[in-house]
Image (tube, rainbow, N blue to C red):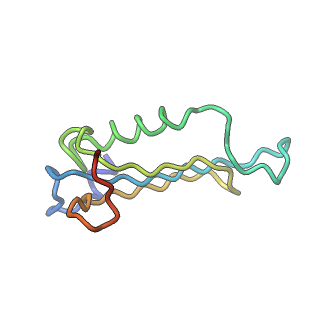
């Protein structure tokens, strides 16, 4: 429901999309403070599926429209999830590598 309120009226829901997700988990006191990669469960792909399903019908018609994803799961001082969705830039020259 919150996602529906965040999407502007003119959002291009039918275009290919790029998805950026940052999952931050509170660093447990028992773990060494120098440990940064979050290698415990939940799995990154399962977290991402949850976000993609939640944004269906809000940011895109079908999650197959997500053509680029950037994801990171890490420790931080607090629990936080940051999500950015933007239309994918598919016009050549923008760093895209053509399929061989």
Q: Quadrant of the C terminus?
A: top left
Residue, x 21% and y 51% (percent of image)?
16
x 16%, y 58%: residue: 12
The picture places residue 1, in percent across and down from the top left corner, at 31, 46
Q: Is residue 16 left or right of residue 22?
A: left
Q: Nearer the viewer, residue 8 or 97?
A: 97
| Quadrant of the image occupied by residue 92 | bottom left
Q: Is residue 60 above or below residue 11?
A: above
Vertical placement of 59 versus 62: above or below? below
Expressed as whole percent of the image width and height from the top left, the position of residue 15 reads 16, 52
**Total residue callouts:** 0
Q: Position of residue 96 (x, y in %)?
A: 31, 59
- Between 3 and 76, the one nearer to me in the picture: 76
Q: Residue furthest front?
A: 100
User: Which residue corresponds to the image point at 39% horizontal and 49% vertical from the top-left?
Assistant: 69
Which percent across, then down, holds residue 4?
26, 51
Query: Is residue 13 rendered to the left or right of residue 69?
Result: left
For residue 7, which quarter of the picture? bottom left
> Farthest residue in the bottom direction?
93
Examine the rendered structure and indicate whether residue 97 appears above or below residue 52: below
């Amino acid at each position: 429901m919150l996602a529906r309120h965040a999407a502007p009226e003119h959002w291009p829901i039918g275009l290919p999309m790029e998805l950026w997700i940052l999952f931050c988990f509170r660093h447990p006191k028992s773990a060494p403070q120098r440990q940064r990669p979050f290698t415990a469960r939940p799995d990154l792909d399962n977290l991402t599926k949850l976000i993609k399903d939640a944004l269906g019908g809000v940011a895109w018609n079908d999650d197959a429209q997500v053509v680029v994803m950037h994801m990171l799961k890490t420790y931080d001082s607090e629990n936080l999830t940051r999500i950015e969705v933007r239309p994918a830039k598919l016009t050549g020259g923008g760093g895209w590598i053509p399929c061989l």
